[in-house]
Amino acid sequence: MLFKSITDNAYSYFKKVADINWKATCILRSSEGGLYHSGRELDKLGKIFRKGGVKLLKSFAKKLVLHVGNLEKLANKIEKIDCSKLTHQQLNNLFSEFEKAVFRAHNFLVPMPVADKAISRMILNCLPQAGEDKKQEWLAILTYPVKENKPTEEEKSFYKLVIAYKGSGNFDYLLNLHLKKYSYLGARNYWWEQAWTKDDLIKRLDNFLAQNKSPKRELNNLEKIKKERKRFFDKLVKKLSIKRNSELFKLIKIAQEYAYLRTWRTNIIYGAGYKARNLFYEIARRAKANKDIVSYLTIFEVGKMAKTGKCPITPSELKRRKIFNASVRIGEEMTVLSGKPWGEKLKKAFGTLEGSRSLKILKGNIAYPGIVRGVARIVEQGERSKINMRKFKRGEIMVATMTFPNFIPAMEKAAAFVTDEGGILCHAAIVAREMKKPCIIGTKIATQVLHDGQLVEVDAKRGIVKILSHH
């Protein structure tokens, strides 16, 4: 609820922060991970990006780096503060400072994939005539990020941890160092209690070793992929006669930057929330409330709690929110829906696609080629995602709305990935290329049509998912 309320109310400031005349005024989010925006509003933003071209895209990226970077600086400062020693006024001032910075940074969450989609379409339109599959293949090669992100850093650190686990005396030191640097990657959407623990890492290490993989070989593969992608890029640029000073080449370089920034911004934003968690916990403590209440409050309710020193919701309302919660923003008003009845109503309205039982084939875009069969497993993003991940078994097909860095432990077990959303610059597409696992993105309806336990075939050579058994 905390994360939802920040993100969805941030767009009131979008015009001022991003210098783009757009606002999201119709949003629904549920605790089970569902996110619904007005298609008309997202299309409008996409058109603005396409019309603005290179100049607007560069400006948007520059503002993203500024405001997300400012949030990181503030979070680093807050992390070093003993909030229990602050006066009432100092605590409120610090919260107000964080609130202002976090609203500005969250403006760059949903608009970023919209910009990605616009860039991809602009590049596809500029590429030489060819079949759509061939152009998508070119797009994947041309837009692969050059810069290394935190999840890749974490992956390299993890492989070094495996090497130490197999016989080095400094394993405990390296394990604690790894957790200090990367545990927050598990705490997506401000569910801070889901940060990776020592137990999580040990289970992940055991799973890796059970697959008889070599950590040294995996490390070498990461470096190999980087060099391979650079070689493929240079070869394709030459083959397609793309001039370095052309509009197309400029768009390609922007796409590479956006592919990097898309993951960078979420890592910083979630990391900033994690670093500032003690500020929120102190506000709850002074209101004589358990710290776990924070994630179930809106940002405005936390602000009210900081000012009054009283818990802003009743125990019965907290209980309802823990069972199910959703937020609806219409215009400038945000409403919280809580409790099982609302969960059932929204599931009925959005959860099942009419006629889905009769569907046998889904279509999407190829992010990485290959064919594999396995049991489908739906992975949701939300407050129960950590439990969700633990249920994931080796060789299963991951089916998700989108994938995120906190999905990595489960993605390492998966045989393939299938997503509802995402373009060629999305997390699933990039990870699939690094792990060399079949991946189909942009099916739009996979999580509504597929069910846990179904046997499916992911044909990422033709971009289709076949349902082989209705378990």
Image (spheres, rainbow, N blue to C red):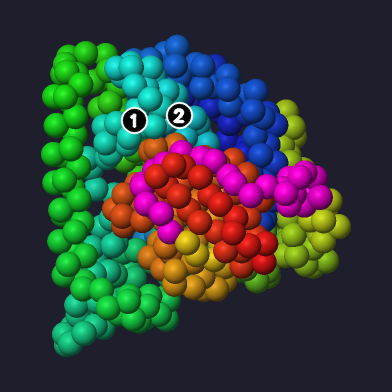
* Residue 180 location, quadrant: bottom left
> Circle 1 sits on which residue?
134
> Circle 2 sits on which residue?
117
Task: Answer whether residue 253 is visible to the viewer in this image.
Answer: yes
Residue at left offset 73%, top offset 41%? 328
Whether the magenta-drawn stretch holds residue 354 is answered as: yes
Q: Nearer the viewer, residue 313 or 412?
A: 412
Q: Position of residue 189 (x, y in %)?
A: 54, 54
Amino acid marked by disc 2 = Lys
Q: Position of residue 149 (x, y in %)?
A: 29, 49
State left or right for residue 204 relative to residue 147. Answer: right
Q: Earlier in the sequence, mark 1 or mark 2?
A: 2
Q: Position of residue 217 (x, y in %)?
A: 17, 67
Residue at left offset 42%, top offset 76%? 200
- Relative vertical location of residue 353 with respect to residue 76 in this rendering, above or below: above
Magenta residues (range): 346-372
- Relative vertical location of residue 418 with respect to residue 199 in this rendering, above or below: above
Q: Nearer the viewer, residue 41 or 379?
A: 379
